[in-house]
Image (cartoon, rainbow, N blue to C red):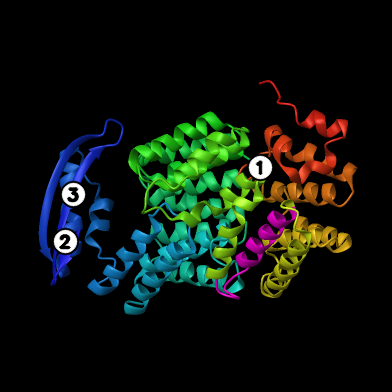
């Protein structure tokens, strides 16, 4: 869609996603105030080209304008565009929030915009790309409930309420109920089975999650974000060939997406192929965001036992971050300390860890249930040799994120327990935790594998233990 001086031009193409063949195309020139009429014309044109007939309910839905305010709708579309990007960054989420908040400011009765604002908040909350603070969770709740109060039968509002219960409360039963109700109103909306795939994945119901992903892809085979999430499932299940297949599908749609190469690099690391990982982590073109690969490059430097190569880039990135913007600065500083320790600069590492602890602790007061924050505080205290505090924090993290409640994030804390126990002279506890996590699906990037046990210096204190050596052996399928 192009816009200039109150006029719009909408170019529409209908493509068979399975064969990539073009079925129909049309161009519409209208005034901005007639945008909703164009949407109705497009839907009817697509239906005619497919020799399909719109149902009475579908005709009714097309006749209803989501808002009478063109500026509000423009802001909504801009917010929507941000949500469709594949980059998982705070800037992306905050861009969506900014436009969606503007949309509902311009039209407080714009239910569709309220629903998308809630969905964006909830997604930022569960992924921790945004600070998972009470205020964010509360905005997600209020936005979903506002959308429902304005239009109780709006499928997107029901979906937003379901996603809020899933992402912010981990109330999976209520989430499923709302999502299934939304599905009855939006039978062709791929986000419904996609969201149900997330819910069942968190519950450890991997086969059901897979079925939902396949249903979502049947409805929307060219959605890069959907394919990326399906690939993530395969990565966390350690089904790496299938993950690579999904990522190749994404590259066929968005060939210049550096984030997909970064994901492929994590798979190569998990398989122990460090040369392949290094090649994938090289920035392929000038437009790529070099910082998006920093975490994986830190991991690469650690696995290669060459920490000095990445320390300058980490320091440069730390200098860019606002002093108290969010707790991720403390997380990055912990990683700097670990790199410095591996490089043999113990004094610098201790100073970095002291700073990291000072940066992380204030956020714990406002985010007391943030297991990820607690997890890194435990690792920071591990580095500082404070055994009692480190294990105490891990108990708190496991209480906040039990495996029984979350089959994705729960195992991450168990892996951290293994790391802390290994480094602080508790080999029995470390081995017990490793045995549990090595065969469990996990959201760590990459998930723990025998190859990573062999390569990662984190596990050096266990190398002489026959039990650890057994875990390092590749299991035959």
Depth check, front residue: 178 or 232: 232
How far is disc 3 from disc 1 in space, using C-alphas?
A: 48 Å
Residue 7: where, in percent of width, then height? 12, 67
Comes first in the chain, label 3 or label 1: 3
Span shown in magenta: 321-341
Left or right: 164, with 463 as reference point: left
Residue 455: where, in percent of width, then height? 70, 37
User: Residue at image x 30%, y 36%?
Assistant: 17
User: Residue at image x 40%, y 72%?
Assistant: 98
Classify 146 as above or below 462. below
Depth check, front residue: 363 or 318: 318
Residue 13 picture quarter: top left
How far is disc 1 from disc 2 in space, using C-alphas?
A: 57 Å
Q: Residues within 10 Å of mark 1 (few under 14, many from 20)?
A: many
Q: Is residue 115 visible?
A: no
Residue 79: where, in percent of width, then height? 36, 65
The residue pinned by badge 3 equals: 12
Tag shown at residue 37: 2
User: Residue at image x 71%, y 42%?
Assistant: 456
Marks 3/1 in contact by CB < 8 Å: the verdict is no
Residue 252 picture quarter: top left
User: Residue at image x 36%, y 77%?
Assistant: 108
Depth check, front residue: 2 or 173: 2
Comes first in the chain, label 3 or label 2: 3
């Amino acid at each position: 869609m192009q816009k200039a001086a109150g006029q719009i031009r909408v170019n529409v193409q209908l493509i068979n996603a399975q064969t990539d063949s073009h079925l129909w195309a049309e161009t519409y020139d209208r005034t901005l105030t007639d945008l909703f009429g164009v949407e109705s014309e497009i839907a009817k044109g697509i239906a005619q080209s497919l020799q399909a007939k719109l149902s009475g309910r579908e005709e009714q839905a097309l006749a209803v304008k989501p808002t009478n305010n063109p500026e509000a709708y423009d802001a909504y579309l801009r917010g929507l565009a941000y949500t469709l990007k594949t980059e998982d960054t705070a800037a992306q989420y905050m861009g969506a929030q900014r436009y969606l908040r503007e949309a509902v400011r311009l039209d407080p009765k714009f239910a569709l915009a309220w629903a998308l604002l809630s969905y964006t908040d909830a997604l930022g909350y569960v992924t921790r790309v945004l600070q998972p603070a009470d205020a964010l969770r509360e905005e997600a709740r209020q936005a979903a409930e506002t959308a429902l109060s304005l239009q109780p039968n709006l499928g997107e509002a029901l979906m937003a309420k379901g996603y809020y219960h899933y992402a912010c409360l981990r109330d999976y039963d209520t989430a499923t109920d709302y999502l299934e109700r939304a599905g009855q109103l939006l039978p062709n909306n791929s986000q419904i089975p996609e969201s149900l795939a997330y819910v069942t994945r968190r519950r450890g119901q991997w086969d059901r999650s897979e079925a939902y992903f396949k249903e979502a892809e049947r409805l929307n085979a060219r959605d890069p974000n959907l394919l990326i999430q399906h690939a993530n499932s395969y990565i966390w299940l350690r089904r790496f060939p299938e993950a690579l297949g999904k990522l190749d599908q994404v590259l066929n749609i968005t060939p210049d997406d550096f984030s997909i190469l970064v994901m492929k690099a994590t798979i190569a690391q998990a398989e122990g192929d460090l040369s392949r990982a290094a090649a994938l982590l090289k920035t392929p073109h000038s437009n790529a965001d070099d910082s998006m690969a920093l975490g994986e490059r830190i991991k690469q430097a650690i696995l290669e036992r060459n920490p000095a190569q990445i320390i300058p880039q980490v320091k440069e990135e730390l200098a860019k971050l606002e002093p108290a913007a969010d707790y991720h600065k403390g997380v990055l500083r912990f990683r700097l300390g670990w790199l410095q320790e591996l490089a043999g600069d113990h004094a610098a590492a201790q100073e970095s860890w002291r700073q990291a602890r000072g940066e992380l602790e204030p956020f714990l007061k406002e985010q007391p249930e943030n297991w990820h924050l607690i997890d890194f505080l435990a690792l920071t205290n591990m580095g500082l040799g404070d055994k009692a505090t480190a294990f105490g924090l891990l108990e708190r993290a496991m209480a906040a994120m039990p495996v029984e409640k979350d089959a994705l994030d729960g195992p991450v804390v168990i892996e951290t327990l293994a790391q802390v126990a290994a480094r602080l002279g508790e080999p029995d506890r470390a081995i017990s935790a490793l045995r549990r996590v090595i065969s469990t699906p996990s959201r760590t990037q990459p998930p723990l594998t025998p190859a990573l046990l062999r390569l990662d210096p984190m596990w050096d204190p266990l190398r002489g233990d026959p039990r650890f050596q057994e875990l390092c052996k590749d299991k035959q399928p």
